[in-house]
Image (cartoon, coloured by chain):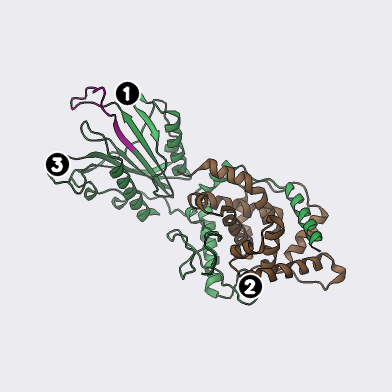
Amino acid sequence: MRDADGFDEFYRVTSVRMLRYGYALTGDLAEAQDVVQEAYTRAWRQWRTVQVHPAPEGWLRLVVARLATDRWRRLSGWRAAVRRAGPPEPAAPPSEDAVLIASALRRLPAHLRQAVALHYLFDLPVARIAAETGRPVGTVTSWLHRGRIELAAILAPSTTVPMPEATDAE
Amino acid sequence: MPNDLERAFGVLVEDTARAQLLPAAEVRRLAGRRSRHASMIAALTVAVLVAGVTVGSRWLLAGDTEPRPLPPLQTASVPPTAAPSSSATGSPSRPASSPPTSVPPTPPPTSSSSAPAIPSSISARAMLTVKDGNTGQFNEVDARRPPKLCADTSYPSSSKAAVRKSVFLLYRAPELPAENVPDDTIYDTVTVYRGAGAEEFLDELRAAVRDCPNGPKKAKYRSLGSFGAGDESLLIERSTPATNPQGEPEPGQEPHLTYIAAARVNDTVALVESLGYENWGSKREPVVALAKTAAKRVAAWRG
C-alpha cells in the first residue's frame, strides 16, 4: 500500500519549490505547471521507491529537468489534451520583470540554466549539483561561472552581443 | 553580480505565485488514470523518443567537453535502472562514478499509463493453477464478488469491472506428504477494470477495513499493509472466534485467522482469499506467497 499521507506531505512541502524550478527551466509558468504535475504523478506511481530514497526531492528535480527539455515541449499538442485535467493556467499575466528573467533564462543553454536554477532556487552547493547532474565538481563549477556571466550579460543587453535562444536538446 | 541574479530569481519566485497546483489527492487520482487518451499519448511519446535515440544525434544536458547521449527509453516491462543500457528507458544516464548516496535514482517512465485493451476473458495463465495448490483439488468457479466485510461494505468500482474470473483450490504445503489433509482453502479472483477502477477498488478495500474493524459473526478485520506485490497491494487479516470441528465455539482458543490479499497490476486486480480448512485457520506466509504468485501471473499476462 502506498503511503498517501506521506506523498501528500511531500507534495505540500516541495511542490511550490518544484514549480519555481520548472518555471526557471521552461520559462513559462503554465508549462511549468504541466511539467511539475506530470513529475508528481510519476512520483506517486513509484512512491514506494521515491519515499525511501535518501533524496526524494532530488529525484523529483531530475524528472522535472527531463520533462522540461525540448522533447517534452515538442509534444505540446498532445499535452494540451492532457491539460484539460490539470490545474487552471495562471490567470494573471506575468510581471514585466518576470518576463525579462524567464526570457533570459531561456537563452541560456539548458545545462547552465539547470545549474544556476539549482544554485539560486535550492541553494545547493556545487557538490550537490554535481551529484544531481552526474557531472564532476569542476564541470559544475564552470557551468555556474558561465551561467552567472551569461545570465548577467543577457540581463544587461546594452553591454553584450545579442544571443540566440538556446535549444535544450542539442 | 550574484546579488543581481539573486534578485532576478527572487522575481521569478514571486511570479510563481500566479500559478496554482492541483491538490495532492487530485494528483494521485490523475496518476491512476488509465484513459485511452493517456495511452495514446504515452505511445506517441515513446515513438518520438525512440526516434530521437535511433537518430543518435541528440544530446541531453551536454557537458563542456563530454556530451551525454539522450538516455534510451523505458517501457512498461522494464524496471527502472541506474545503468544506461541498450534497452528502452526514460531514466537519466548516470556516470558510474557518481556518489550512490547522493544521486537520485532513475526517474520513472509513465509505464503504467499504457494498459492494454480490455480483454474479452481472463486467461488461465493469469490465475493460480492446480500445481500451486499441491492437492489436485482445483476448479474454476463462478466469479466471486469482493469480500463484504460489513453489511454496508460497498465497492462502487464494481461498476467498472469489465471481466472477472475465479478459481478455487485446496492448498497443502509442498513439503508435506500427499496423505496429509490440506492446509487451506483458497480462492483466486482476477478482475480487469475499466478506467481507474482497479485503483479505486484498492482504495475501497482499504476504506472497508478501516471503516469496518468489527464485522458480523464477531469477525475482526485488520489491515497488514502492503505485501509487496504488483503496483500496490493490501493484506487484510480476518479474525474469527475459534470453533471445534462441529462449528461450535471454543472459548479460550486462539482465534481463527484467515486472509484477504489484493494486488493491483495496472488495471487488473488479483484477489486471493483464504478461508482456512475445516476448523483450522490459515497461515499467513503461504497465503502471501500464493498472492504474490497470483500477482506475478497477472503481471506476466497483462503487466
In the rendered structure, which disc, 3 or 2, sits on the residue that comes first in sequence? Answer: 2
What are the residue bounds of the magenta stretch? Answer: B242-259
C-alpha distance separating marks 2 and 1: 68 Å
Crowdedness near tag 3: few (<14), some (14–19) or many (≥20) residues, C-alpha within 10 Å: few
Q: B58 or B6: nearer the eye?
A: B6
Name the N-terminal-most of marks 2 and 1: 2
The kind of residue tagged 2 is Gly
Q: Position of residue A5 (x, y in %)?
A: 54, 40
A41 up-or-down from A137: above or below: above
Q: Which residue is mark 3?
A: B180
Q: How many marks?
A: 3
Do the residues marked 3 and 1 share a common chain? yes
Q: Is residue B246 magenta?
A: yes
Q: Dot 1 corresponds to which residue?
A: B217
Q: What residue would you read off at disc 2?
A: B63
Q: Which badge, 3 or 1, comes first in the chain's sequence?
A: 3
Q: Look at the image and tell me whether residue B146 can be seen.
A: no
- Classified by dominant secondary structure, the portion drawn in magenta counts as loop
Q: Residue at the right extreme?
A: A158
Foreground mark, 2 or 1, reads 2
Query: Mark 3 against mark 1, which lies toward the viewer?
Result: 3
Q: Quadrant of residue B22?
A: top right
Identify the secondary structure beneath mark 3: loop
Q: Secondary structure at mark 2?
A: loop
| Residue sitting farthest toward the left | B179
Disc 3 and disc 2 in contact, CB within 8 angstroms: no
